[in-house]
Amino acid sequence: MSLNQIRPWRTIERRKSRQIFVGNVPVGGDAPISVQTMTNTLTTDVKATVAQIQSAAEAGADIVRVSVPDEASARALKEIVRESPVPIVADIHFHYKRGIEAAEAGAACLRINPGNIGDKKRVAEVIRAARDHNCSIRIGVNAGSLEKHLLDNYGEPCPDAMVESGMDHIRILQDHDFHEFKISVKASDVFMSAAAYQMLAEATDAPIHLGITEAGGLTSGTIKSAIGLGQLLWMGIGDTLRVSLSADPVEEVKVGFEILKSLGLRHRGVNIISCPSCARQGFDVIKTVEALEQRLEHIKTPMSLSIIGCVVNGPGEALMTDVGFTGGGAGAGMVYLAGKASHKMSNDQMIEHIVGEVEKKAAALDEQAAQDDQTEQEEQAAQDIAAAE
Ligand code: SF4
C-alpha cells in the first residue's frame, strides 16, 4: 500500500488530460510529470550543446529544448538529435521554414505558435512536416509576446488574453486534424500565470506544459517557480514542466525535480531531510549536508536520508527514513538503518560511512525493484497463458 493510500491528505488528483508523445516520452494522461530544460549554448556549436544536453539528462531531464533561430542551427540540430540521450524540442519563432527543417532534422517536438508563422499555406506545410516526421507540437503562449489584436482588445496582457491566444492556436491545429500537441501559457508574474493555467485547464484536455517564464536567478527564480508551479501541481494541473532560471540548465532540472518530489509527484535520488542546526548540534550539520549532497549526486534510486544535529528530532526523523545519522556527544553519533538505531559512528568518518550505507541501500532497493518487475512479468505471463487455454 502506498503512502498516499495510507494518508489521503497527501493525495493529489491529477487533471485528466489526453496523452501525447515527445519522442519516446509520454506527456499527459497518467504519465509521470516530465521535467524539461533548455540549452543556452549556440546551437551551431554542436559539441557544447550536446555536452549540455548530456549533463541535463544526467541530472534527470526527460526532454531538452534547443533554439533553432537560423538555417545553420537547423542543420546542426540533426547531429544534436543523433547524439542526444533524450528527445529534443526545437524552439521556433516566426520562421515557418525552420519548423519544417527542424521536423526533418529529427526534432521530437516543435515549440511553435501556428498563428505566428504566416499564411495558411505555410501553417499547413509546417503541420504536414510535423505529422510526416512523428513530431508533436507545443503551443507556447507567452504574456510578453501576445498578438496585437488581443492586446488591443484586452488593453494589456492578462489571463483571458493568454488563454484566448492559446485556444486560437489550438483551433488551427485541430482544423488540420492535428492533435499531438501540448500547450503552455507562461508569464513572469505568478498570479497571471496561475490564473491563466487554471482557465486553460478548464478550456482544453490537451496536456499542459507548466512554467513561470523568466523567473529570475537561482534563488529568486526557484522560489517564484515553486510557488507558481507548486500551487498548480497541487491542484492537479500540469503534465510536464520547465523551471526557467538565469542559471545552468542542470539547476533548472534539479529545481524541477525538487518541486515534484516535495509534492510526491516524482521520486528520484536521495531525499535529504536535515535540520537547520543550532547550539545543540553534535557535528557540523551544514557542512555535512553540503558534502553529502555532492557525494550522493550519482544515486538515482528514490530513497531518504536524515541528517539531524541532535536527539531532539533525530530519532523521530530517522524513523521515517531509509538511512539516518543523529548527532550525539563525544565526537560520535548514531547511525539508523530502516528507522532503527543501528550503530555508533565517529563524526570524522561519518560522511564516508553514510555514503557507503546509502549506496548499499540503493543497491538493495534496485535489486528488490528488479525482482518485483520480474515477478509481475511472470504473473502476467501466467495470466495470459491461463486466458489462452
Ligand atoms: S535537531 Fe537538534 S541540532 Fe538540529 S536544530 Fe533541532 S535542536 Fe538544533
Image (tube, rainbow, N blue to C red):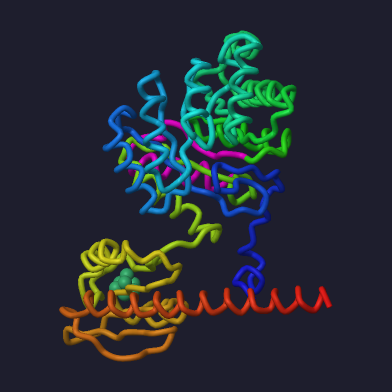
Q: Nearer the viewer, residue 272 or 102?
A: 102
Q: Residue 133 appears at what percent x and percent y?
A: 57, 33
Examine the image and state in which quarter residue 283 appears: bottom left
Residue drawn at x 60%, y 44% is 238
Residue at x 44% of width, y 36% of height: 65
| Image quarter (top left, top right, bottom left or bottom right) of the C terminus | bottom right
Which sits in the foreground, 67 or 186? Answer: 67
Question: Which quarter holds ligand 1?
Answer: bottom left
Q: Quadrant of the N terminus?
A: bottom right
Q: Quadrant of residue 118?
A: top right
> Seen in the image, is 78 located left or right of residue 277?
right
- Residue 360 appears in the figure: yes
Q: Main secondary structure of the magenta part?
A: helix
| 249 left or right of 14 in image | left
Magenta segment range? 208-232
Residue 82: x and y, percent? 41, 40
Q: Position of residue 105 (x, y in %)?
A: 46, 30
Query: At 36% across and 43% down in the image, what residue appears?
Result: 53
Which residue ends up furthest to the front in the rendered image?
A: 389
Task: Look at the picture and state if 112 lies above or below 215.
Answer: above
Residue 341, x across and y down, in percent: 37, 89
Question: Is residue 312 something that shows in the picture?
Answer: no
Report if residue 115 lies within the magenta region: no
Side (left or right) of 319 relative to 30: left
The quadrant holding residue 271 is: bottom left
Assess whether residue 231 is covered by the magenta stretch: yes
Which residue is at the front of the view, 44 or 173? Answer: 44
Horizontally, residue 384 falls left or right of residue 257, namely right
